[in-house]
Structures are given as C-alpha cells and as structure tokens.
Image: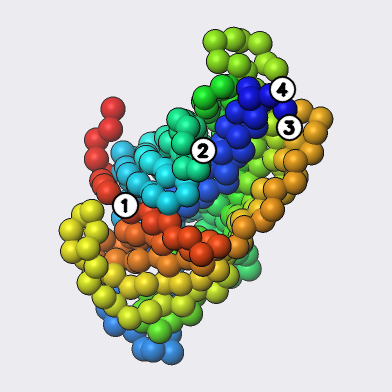
Amino acid sequence: MNKTAQGVLLAGMAAVAAMVAAPAWSQDASQPQAAVPASEAGADVPGRTLCDAPWFRSGSRVQMEGDGAMPMSITMTLRDATQRTSGCRAQLEVRSKSAMSALMGPPVVMDQEHAVNVARRTSTAQGSIESEHAVINARGRYARMFGEAAFKGSGVFNYAGMAIREGATLDGETFESSVSLKIYPLGSDEAVGTLRAQHASIIVGARHVGRRQTIETPMGRKECMPITYEKRTSLGPVLLGDDVVQVEPTLMEVTDWYCPAEAFVLRTEVRQKGKLQRVDVTSLERDSEVP
C-alpha cells in the first residue's frame, strides 16, 4: 500500500471513528432537583426526556476539547428545535477536528448535519433517538470524503430524565451507527473509492455515581459528581472499496463528571490500554442567537 493509499485509509478510519462518537452530544436532560429518598436515587423522573433538557433549544452550542492519543475539538449546535407530544426534533450540526497523535499529521476535519428525532418513553415502549441520512463531509491529508451517516440509540440517553444522586446506579444504553462515504483525492472531483461501516456500535454498561467533589474546569471551579462505567465501541467490518478491514473493538473505562448546577457533564475521562484521555467542555451556550 503506497503512502497516499495509507493516508486515505487512515483519514477514512478517523472519520468513521469520529462519526461513531456523534451520539455523545446527547449529554443530559436532567436539571437540579429537590432531594429524593435514597431508594429512588437513579430512578426515572416521570415525563422527563432529552427533549426537556435546558439546552435543547434552537441556537444552543457546546464546545469540547480533548487531549490524549486522539486530540480533538468538537463544536455542536442545535437549530430548528421543535417540541411534539410524542417527543422532539432538531437539526444538529457537528464540526470536529480529530487526529491520531502518533502519526503527527494534520487532523481530519469533519462536518456533520443531522436531523435528530427523539421519541419519549411510554408505559409500553422505551424511548429512542434517531438520525437518518445525515450529511458527512470530511477532509484529511490526502483525501476528502463525502456521504451519509445514521445513528439510533435506545436506553436513557446518558442522564436524560434521571435523578442523579450520590451512590446511585444508572442503567446503560446502546447506540448503533452506520456511515457510507465516497473518497476523492484532494483537488479532484472524481471518486477513487468508497468506505462503508454499516454495523458500528456503542454499548454503555451500568453507571455508578460517586461522591460530589469540587473540580477545576475550563469554565471555573464546579461541584460535580463522578459517574463511572465501561464503554465498548465497535466499528464492525469496514469496507474500503471491495476490501474488508477488521478493526478490533475497544473497551474503555469512562468517568463522566456531571455538574448539577450546569445540568451537564463538563468533563469526561477515558482510560484505554493504560492511557488516559480527557475531554473538557470549554463553552456551553444555551438559547443563544445563532445566525
């Protein structure tokens, strides 16, 4: 495999990995609440879903920065958010830069446009979050990629609708994703290949809420609670043209620092194969006017 082909593959894999992480935007719909009995800590709050998040409004924007083996910068913006009896929907824009630090090359830059639909939980059905036919536009050192992606999640959507209390154990969740991209050399409009991952998944195990602590964040000193769990990510078989590339699933130990006053996770620490990566929220704008 020549250098250009290697670059195309690496850029494509980074794009797929970043796309799989897209559901991380659905952080938390919880708001600070009055004390509840310990026996009810971590239970569902009736009627509360992601749709009720204080930031689920048109123009809300989150900026995150990550270090470690895959440094990243992610900006997520909601537009055209609307409420329905059965749930809610919004346009989600995700703009990201990510790179594999070991390669010391330029980052993969990717824009995503999702039409997100959230269905509320009912007495007979679990809630869901779904995006179909999202537009993906990515660019690496040797190539650019354009195509579609989709994801669907079920469970509690991180901390949506949960009474977050010290000592609680929260249920897990599952996301399934897919992506299909055409690959173009930089400076050319003629596709030279395709990249598809149709069975990517994220499985989050039961989460354990720790003791409230004061931590330093880019947004100042905050009182937050560490929530720990295992997260398993799989890209499934990745098709690069007609070739099948098997990517080893990853198992990560994750700590989310949930900060009740902000009703948001302001820091996530990920430990994988003995290495630690940290992703911090550096800006959280709610109900801002975005042109």
Give residue 194's position: percent from left, percent from top. Answer: 71, 26
Image marks 2 and 1: residues in contact by CB distance under 8 Å: no
| Front of the two marks 1 and 4 | 4
Give residue 139's position: percent from left, percent from top. Answer: 51, 25
Estimate how packed mark 1 is, as few (under 14), some (14 to 19) or many (20 or more) residues with alpha carbons within 10 Å.
many
> Could you tell which of marks 1 and 4 lies nearer the N-terminus?
4
Q: Identify the residue under disc 4.
A: 193
The residue drawn where x is 60% and y is 16% is 185
C-alpha separation, residue under disc 4 versus residue under disc 3? 7 Å
Which of these two is toward me, 157 or 186? 186
> Could you tell which of marks 3 and 2 lies nearer the N-terminus?
2
Vertical relation: 94 (above or below) 236: above
Farthest-out residue, left: 220
Q: Is residue 91 visible?
A: no
- Image disc number at residue 281: 1
> Could you tell which of marks 2 and 1 lies nearer the N-terminus?
2
Vertical relation: 64 (above or below) 250: above
| Front of the two marks 2 and 1 | 2
User: Which amino acid, mark 4?
Assistant: Gly
Q: Identify the residue under disc 3.
A: 240
